[in-house]
Amino acid sequence: MREAQPFDLEAFIAFVASKPADEEYDYCDNQGCPIFQFLIASGEAVNSVGPTRWHDEDGIAHDIPGGALGPLGDALVTDPKTFGALRARLASLTDKGVGR
């Protein structure tokens, strides 16, 4: 297995922007979680996503900077849970310097 790449907020935002704006996501379901979907699309061998880390298929934990306990998590759990709304919330975060 290749080495996992650090979580990249800018790449995550680009992934969210590539999704249909009206597509809904389910933050509480691993496969429906935008972070899980992003990691899979990035070629990661992801098994699960938690509040501050994701785990690969070997059980190794990898950090999600900010995770679900900070502004990124707030953006993910806020309604409406569509990729278009999430894209707008994430843009607001980067405008405030989060993830830099």
Image (cartoon, helix red, strand yellow):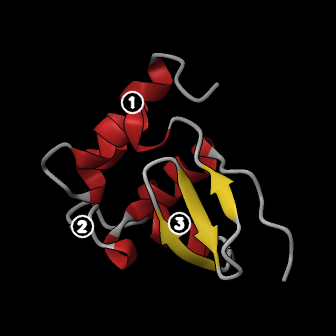
In screen coordinates, is 71 left or right of 5? left
Residue at 36 percent of width and 46 percent of height: 87
Q: How many numbered marks, from 0 up?
A: 3
Residue 8 in sight from this viewpoint: yes
Residue that mark 2 sits on: 26
Tell me the element at label 2: loop
In screen coordinates, is 47 left or right of 75? right
Q: Position of residue 72 (x, y in %)?
A: 41, 38
Instruction: Please say if 57 is above or below 83.
Output: below
* Badge 3 or badge 2: first in the primary sequence: 2
Residue at 22 percent of width and 58 percent of height: 82
Whole-angstrom CA distance, mark 1 to mark 2, is: 18 Å
Extreme residue in the top direction: 96
In screen coordinates, is 3 left or right of 97? right
Residue type indicated by callout 3:
Phe
Extreme residue in the right direction: 2
Viewer-side residue, 35 vs 56? 56
Residue that mark 3 sits on: 38
Residue that mark 1 sits on: 71
Quarter of the image for residue 43 reads bottom right
Instruction: Please say if 73 is above or below 6.
Output: above
Q: Are marks 3 and 1 in contact (CB under 8 Å)?
A: no
Tell me the element at label 3: helix
* Badge 1 or badge 2: first in the primary sequence: 2
Q: Are marks 1 and 2 in contact (CB under 8 Å)?
A: no
Q: Position of residue 96 (x, y in %)?
A: 46, 16
Residue type indicated by callout 2:
Asp
Tell me the element at label 1: helix
Whole-angstrom CA distance, mark 3 to mark 2, is: 13 Å
